[in-house]
Amino acid sequence: MSVDFDVAVIGGGPGGYIAAIRAAQLGMKTVCIDDWKTDGKPAPGGTCTNVGCIPSKALLEASSHYELAKEGFAHFGVGIKGVELDVSRMQARRASVVRQNNDGIAFLFRKNKITFFNGTGSFAGCRDGEYRIDVTGDEPRQFTCTHVIVATGSKPRAWPGVPFDEKRVLSNTGVLAMEAVPESLAIIGAGVVGLEMGSVWRRLGAAVTLFEAQPALLAGADRQIAMEAQKQLTRQGLTIYTGATVRKVEPVDGGVAIEYDDAQGQVAKAVFDKLLVSIGRVPYTQGLGAENVGLKRDERGFVAVDGQCRTNLKNVWAIGDVVRGPMLAHKAEEEGVAVAERIAGKYGHVDYRAIPWVVYTHPEIAWVGRTEEELAEAGVIFRVGTFPFMANGRARTMGTTEGFVKILADAKTDEVLGVHMIGPMVSELIAEAVMAMTFKATSEDIARICHAHPTLSEAVREAALAVDGRALNM
């Protein structure tokens, strides 16, 4: 049997399309299969591009501009009268941004001579070390390949017994596509998606209520950061119930009824126009044909892999949301590059210690490395340096002085162990912290680097100086 491709990538999300590009760059004949379609046209990019990272940021940006035009620009001496909200136009722009990204990925496939099939890819069998892949869709196909990279991603977890109808009970797909602002929006789960989407629709005029089962907001974040986030978001008008156990969800005429236990254990009920269920995501392997080749999955449905993203099958790899680890687009991209390089006989590397997290609320939230609580629990002796944006000149000129930067450094070696931020544009500032931790920098290293003035990045340097008790502007 002749082999049609060296590498087949099943899934065209951030991990899949990046893996395909890197494999092609390394001289391997590569095919990528992805089944996303929008308005009848192929839409490579996966959840991130189509109903996740990209459209959510488009709406966050649009809703922020609306709120500023309505309330914020007057502070700068810019008076605006007659501000109008056009949700349909806002949604059209979101769709346009998504399509630009879809088309950009298609261009990259052509540029790198990657074959692209729009459809669902599945294992059909294996013989003599060659995998047979079926593609179902508008144009069914079958081909053989030597290596397979599974990058099929994840899907939203529904509330038990209450499927998504994307009209009243919404997933991330439905909440991004609403054509009108609901009077009330409930969100179960105050994680990244819940907080970002709650911020969008609160800015546009909805009364937003978040129910979080954990006793505190953003369980994975540093507690000091999470407490500041809850204070700022509550001040903006989001109603956030932590320690709230939702007992029952029931669609009713005109909305969705929710019964829940509040933090004091009292049973309460409320009816909302719309409900976003944001209680996590599950690996997506439907239609993959894993059983046809004996591809192993773990007890939670993830494709089982080792530390190098190898599965139990020779020359079959898996990356991104469909495997263990954080469900983050940039983590998937890193794994995609690493796997392509390993297939080519090179040293593919992913530093899982230095994968950043970002929440695109206002103020933004970002962190990398270990939290103060994790270090204390592990018995690590460390020093802390913090610096508020209130004392940063650039933040003052921008009128966004909420939040601070926090650096945790080993008390003996001064190596940076974690960096945590809440404030303006920290989604960009966190890259410096990732760089520092990747190269095992000390807080003194950061403190000794010249940062341009006036910039927000000076807050990072000042926090590093504060580790040694010598912040200059506070």
Image: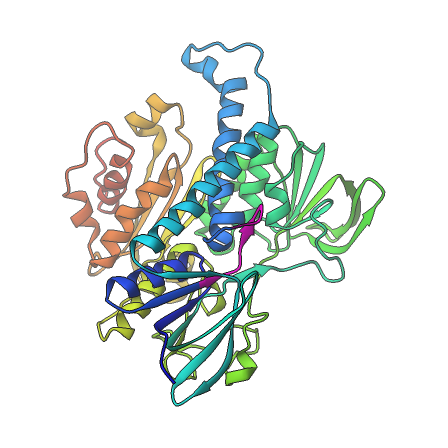
Q: Position of residue 308 (x, y in %)?
A: 34, 75
Q: Is residue 412 magenta?
A: no
Which residue sits at x=36%, y=40%?
A: 426
Is any atom of residue 456 visible in this view? yes
Q: Position of residue 238 (x, y in %)?
A: 61, 36
Q: Is residue 36 magenta?
A: yes
Front residue of 445/42: it is 42
Which residue sits at x=54%, y=83%?
A: 292
Front residue of 437/17: it is 17
Q: Quadrant of residue 178?
A: top right
Q: Position of residue 427 (x, y in %)?
A: 37, 42
Considering only vertical position in the picture, is 175 above or below 36? above
Is any atom of residue 350 visible in this view? no
Quarter of the figure that contains the N terminus: bottom left
Which of the colour schemes (rainbow, by chain, secondary structure, one colour) is used?
rainbow
Considering only vertical position in the picture, is 224 above or below 317? above
Furthest residue to the bottom?
128
Considering only vertical position in the picture, is 183 above or below 99? above
Q: Give the extent of the magenta segment.
A: 33-41
Considering only vertical position in the picture, is 285 above or below 416? below
Front residue of 446/277: it is 277
Quarter of the figure that contains the C terminus: top left
Q: Position of residue 243 (x, y in %)?
A: 64, 53
Which residue sits at x=51%, y=55%?
A: 219
Q: Quadrant of residue 4?
A: bottom left
Which residue sits at x=37%, y=36%?
A: 425
